[in-house]
Amino acid sequence: MPSPPTVTPLLVAELLVEGERMPVCVHVIDHPDGRVLVDTGMPEVHPSVADMDPRLIPLSEQDLDLASIDFVVNTHLHFDHCGGNRLFAGTPIYVQRRELEDARSEEDYTIPEWVDAPGVGYVPVDGELEVLPGVRLVPAPGHTPGSQVIVVEMDERPVVIVGDTAVWSGELDEPSTVGQRLVRALDPELAWLAHEREPWRPRTG
Ligand SMILES: [Zn+2]
């Protein structure tokens, strides 16, 4: 039996939000059939978000060979999740079609030139999609209508990468959106959030 996939968080930025430092993490899935990057952080400061005093740890300076990434998945297209997409020109980037349409049409949704940077090519997805054996994209509306989570099947319970479907762990303890309830219904061993350093785990007992 092949070894199960692994999910590794990488801290790529810290933003100042309401006086506190909020981490921005991306996640690497190492699967026997491919290597996937979930979200791409923000490699530079854009004037429109300079008030968040971003501290950046760019992907290009991390212990990660960008050329080793087979494809990228965006949980959603807010600026702190898609800023590094331009580093992956020519690499397929999977995103829900609804999310892509909203990011391209709604005002103040994101930083448009980060979404459609030169050479960036999207694979718009309608609903669930298995991208590798046991790795599924699943729509999870809530944080944005077009958000998706990534479900990684393990030997027992799955690991879920939720992006901002929960911005902090407490939201999964008391789920209030369709997406949060979906994550709970998957009964994961743990869930990785984009803005928490430690994964959420369901309480036992
Ligand atoms: Zn975010």
Image (spheres, rainbow, N blue to C red):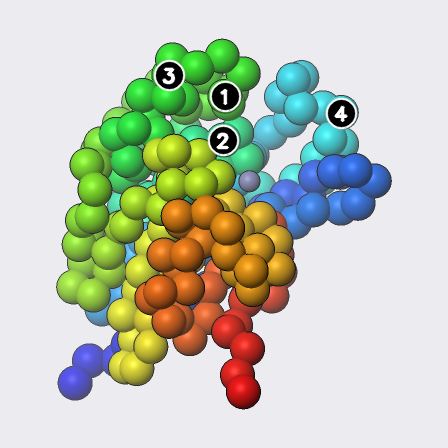
Q: Is residue 134 left or right of residue 80?
A: left
4 or 1: mark nearer the eye: 1
Identify the residue under disc 3. 104
Q: Is mark 4 within 8 Å of ligand 1?
A: no
Q: Which mark is residue 40?
A: none
Can you identify the residue that label 1 sits on? 109
**Residue 85's x, y, as percent?**
41, 33
Judged left or right of residue 204, residue 14 is right
Q: On the image, which quarter does residue 76 sit in?
A: top left
**Of callouts 4 and 2, the N-terminal one:** 4
Q: Residues within 10 Å of mark 3 (few under 14, many from 20)?
A: some
- Give, as a three-letter code, the residue at label 4: Asp
Expressed as whole percent of the image width and height from the top left, the position of residue 129 reads 18, 49
Which mark is first along the chain, 3 or 1? 3
Tell me the SS state at disc 1: loop
Q: Is residue 30 above or below residue 204?
A: above
* Amino acid type shown at disc 2: His
Residue 146: percent from left, percent from top: 35, 34
Instruction: Decide: is 109 above or below 63.
Output: above
* 76 horizontally vs 51: left or right: left
- Asked if residue 150 lies left or right of residue 113, the reply is left
Task: Please say if the residues under marks 2 and 1 sit with CB atoms less than 8 Å apart.
Answer: yes
Q: Residue at label 2?
A: 78
- Specify the amino acid type for callout 1: Tyr
Q: Is mark 2 within 8 Å of ligand 1?
A: yes
Tell me the residue that label 4 is attached to: 51
Marks 4 and 2, how far apart at CA? 16 Å
Rate crowding at label 2 as few (under 14), some (14 to 19) or many (20 or more) other CA atoms within 10 Å: many
In terms of sequence position, does the residue under pointer 3 or pointer 4 come before the other? 4
Taking the view exactly as shown, the residue that stands out farthest to the right is 19
Look at the image and tell me whether residue 90 can be seen: no
Write down which quadrant ligand 1 falls in: top right
